Image (cartoon, helix red, strand yellow):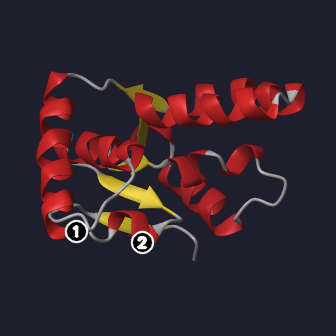
Amino acid sequence: MKYLLDTSVCLQPIKRRPVLAALERWDTQGLDALATSAACLAEIEWGLYKLASERRWLGYRRDILPSVRALSVDSNVWSKWAVLKARQDALGLPVDDIDLVIAATALCNDLIVATLNVRHFAQIEGLCWEDWSC
């Protein structure tokens, strides 16, 4: 594995207007190079429950779940999350909790975060990330 897909990338297969560059990178890397955090899938499912769109649920089950392995959010990830959360708070640069869990998952597994939301991850010290929008 090389990349951890964040929610913005992981959602692309079911978006009405997907970012083609992200889908191309996904295809180019291949499934063995990709993973996501279980927290990312939970965030997607939360959004799907809010939308209540059977079409989107079908796309999620068909196009996302079989296409990416989900890494557990275990005690090591939560410990890293606590460090990241405290650091961001001390710097006065808060980051959404789910994004910090995704970052912690990447750091614990030595992965690069693939994202379309650079500003969410660029301020996290020590995190490697790539912008998949181009």
Q: Nearer the viewer, mark 2 or mark 1?
A: 1
Q: Please state which amino acid type lies under the numbered disc 2.
A: Arg
Q: Position of residue 57 (x, y in %)?
A: 78, 26
| 69 sits left or right of 10 in the view | left
Q: Position of residue 107 (x, y in %)?
A: 19, 47
Rendered residue at 86%/30% (across/down): 53
Residue under circle 2? 119
Rendered residue at 76%/43% (across/down): 14
Rendered residue at 13%/62% (across/down): 90
Residue under circle 1? 92
Of residue 42 and residue 4, the one placed in the foreground of this image is: 42
Query: How far apart are labels 2 and 1 at the CA level?
Result: 15 Å
Rendered residue at 27%/49% (across/down): 111
Q: Please state which amino acid type lies under the numbered disc 1.
A: Gly
Image height of 103 relative to 75, above or below: below
Q: Position of residue 23 (x, y in %)?
A: 65, 57
Whichever of callouts 2 and 1 sits on the residue coming sooner in the sequence is 1
| 71 sits left or right of 48 in the view | left
Q: Quadrant of residue 32?
A: top left
